[in-house]
Each structure stands twice: as structure tokens, then as C-alpha cells.
Amino acid sequence: ASPAKRIAGPATTASTATTAGTSPSAKVWTAEYMSRNTTVTRAQALADASHFDRIFAHKGDYTPFLADMHAVNPRLKVIAYFNGTFARSSELAAFAESSFAHDAQGRRIRSGGWDLYLMNPADAAWRNSRVKLCLAMLAESGYDACGADNVGTAVLLPGYVSGLPINPATNKVYTSDEWVTALCIQIRSGISPRALYGNSLGNGSVYFASTRRLLNALDGASVETFLRGGRESITSYPTVQGWKANVDMLVDAATTSKDIMTATKVWTTGTQAQKDQWHLFAYSTYLLGAGPNSRFWFSYVEGGAQNAYYSLWSTAIGAPSAGYVAMGSVFGRDFTGGKVLVNPDKVGHTVSLGGTYHTLDGVAVTSVTLAPHTGLLLTF
């Protein structure tokens, strides 16, 4: 098979799966909660359990199949999705005005893309409601953990919501430090010993600027814009500095015991070849920094099911044998079964491999030329 076919062809049945979690290179997760208008069947649930060891899902989607799923994969954690900082219209009557976030003009703040209202993370009633909701979801669904959406700093960016939230204690816009931890600390304490996951750390640059401290309040977190925003142009790549921040985020997070789950989406117009290039680029980048608790996920299209498993993820490169290093303008990492290379630059570069390796389509090589913004997996 050509590299493109290896990347694009999903393998979604249990018979084609590798054992979930055998090494950092094999660890993948799924943001199943992003699926639209789909129903999880027993066959799909068992396939998902064999492929993924973290499944972030709407409550009830997997409930009828949980016992069999855990038998297939004892390391599996199914995470119940809920919104950590936004309330639906149907919830509004339950809260006093003090529970809502307000902008500088005192107006309630709405989500830019959904019929949701931003709430005040410092308000005790809102915090308590999230604890109660999480506990109720765990009891009803039988899931292993809760996952709070929108607990990162995206709401502090102009344009993401209708206005910037004012901290009632300071009468100024919330700082990232004020926003990110208080809510999650209370929820996690309230549901202990059950685990709390959060979305999102953003990307590497955001992580080092503000969201890293979220890991102190969570058992794991997703990185929803790993390398790119889902709806950005297919030809929009990060700068080398921005790219490297994503790798360094994984390296830094590996010093903790927390699960870090990267997500790269190409929910935009592009050819199959362009999206496949992004897939290999993102996966190779992930492998450069991945630690024991890192996981990867990639999505080609918005809507529909979001739990496809790709044969690229089964490439037998083994476990890391060293950290990532710069090889001129290309970056590489050695694995027990091969090597991973990434060129984040705008121009192509040729690399001498120091030995014989094989490409995904079986060609023996001793040197390779990487086009701009490409990744490469090589095996012995």
C-alpha cells in the first residue's frame, strides 16, 4: 500500500486493531462526543474498546456495552462529557443572575456558535451544579470519569464569545490565572475518587502561557487545537516556533502523571492528499514528544461518527529509545523499531539516516528528503 492509502484507510473492526496502550506510539483516544447523528452499536463499541483506551463520549452512548468493553480492554476509561462553563437555555431558570458571567456592560455572555450562556466559574451555585451533574452522569451512565468541556482560556479571546467576562472580585476581565483552575478544583474534589478530565489545553503556545496550571486541577486534559484550529485553511501551518511549542508541551506534560490527549482536525476544504499530509505531519509531530500518558486523535471531517481508527496508528515503530533532537532543520526521534522525522519548515530538507530504514510502502532508504510541513515514519 502507498503511504497515502495507509493513512487514509480506516481500520474500524476489532480484528484489525492493535492492543490499545502497548506503547506511546500506539496510544490513541477518541473524542466521540463530537459525533453527530450517530448511534453506537455493540460491534462498534467493542471495536472502539480494542482501539482506544480513552473514549470521551456523551453519557449513555456506550452504557449498554461497558462490561464487554472493559473485558476487551481493562485499561479503558470512558469519560462522560458535560459543559463546564456554559449553560443551555433549558438550564437558565435554575440560576440566579450572580451565576452568570457578564461583560463590562453587565450583559450576559453567549457562545459565538451555540445557544449557550457563559457562567461565572467563581459562583458557588454554578460550581455545585457541575459537581451534582457529574455525579448524576456517572451514576446513570456507568462511565469511569467525567470530562468538562470549555474549561480552558478560549473564552478570554475576543470573538469566541459575545463579550469578555468580568471577574466580580476585581471588576476587571478575568485573567487566565483566575479563570482556569478554581472551577475544576471544586469539581474534582466533589467527585473524588472519580477522575476529572478537561477540554482544552489549547495548543503548545497556550499551554505554556496559561493552561498548564489546569493539570493541577485535572486527571487529564485534551489539546483540541494541536498544531491547528480545525477550520483553518488546509494550507495554514504553524511557524517552526509555534510547532515546536506543541512538541515541548508533550515533553513537559510527560513529567506529570496526567493524561494528555491531542486532537488535530481538518474540518475545512482540502484534497484527500492535503488532509493525509496533515494527518502524517500531526501524528509524526505527536510521536516526537509523546510520553507514557500521551494519546493522539485525528479527524478528517466535521459531523458523523468521530471514532475511526487508522492503520497509520498501527505502524510498528516500537517505544521511544531517546528524546527528540534537531537534525539541522528537521527534527527526529529514535524508536526501538524505527525512527520518526518531521520537517516543520517552509522548505524541503534532506537527511542522512545513518543506517537503512524502510518507508511505509516498504522502500529501503539511507537518506530521505522531506518536503515542507511533512512527517515520516520509518521502520527497520
Image (cartoon, rainbow, N blue to C red):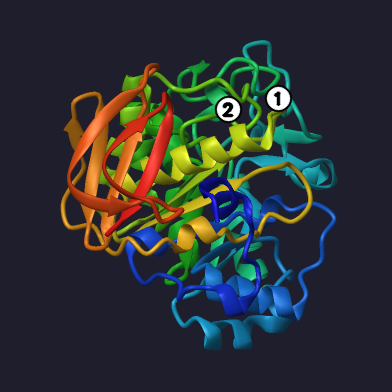
Q: In 3D space, how far apart are the residues under numbered discs 2 and 1 (Cα atoms)?
A: 10 Å
The relative height of residue 50 versus residue 338 in the rendered view (above or below) is below
> Callout 1, which amino acid?
Ile
Q: Are marks 2 and 1 in contact (CB under 8 Å)?
A: yes
Quadrant where the N terminus lies?
Answer: bottom right
Between 253 and 342, which is closer to the camera in this rendering?
342
- Which mark identifies residue 109? 1
Q: What residue is shown at x 46% (from left), y 32% (from top)?
A: 227
The relative height of residue 119 versus residue 380 in the rendered view (above or below) is above
> Callout 2, which amino acid?
Val
The relative height of residue 87 versus residue 23 in the rendered view (above or below) is above
The answer to which of marks 2 and 1 sits earlier in the sequence is 1
Disc 2 secondary structure class: helix
Disc 1 secondary structure class: loop
Q: Is residue 322 left or right of residue 159?
A: left
- Which mark identifies residue 155? 2
The relative height of residue 269 versus residue 81 in the rendered view (above or below) is above
Between 276 and 203, which is closer to the camera in this rendering?
276
- Which mark identifies residue 255? none
The location of residue 50, given as percent across then percent down, is 55, 76
Q: Quadrant of residue 85?
A: top right
The location of residue 184, given as percent across then percent down, is 47, 49
Q: What residue is shown at x 32% (from left), y 60% (from top)?
A: 317
Q: Is residue 45 left or right of residue 175?
A: right
Quadrant where the C terminus lies?
Answer: bottom left
- In this figure, what is the number of numbered marks? 2
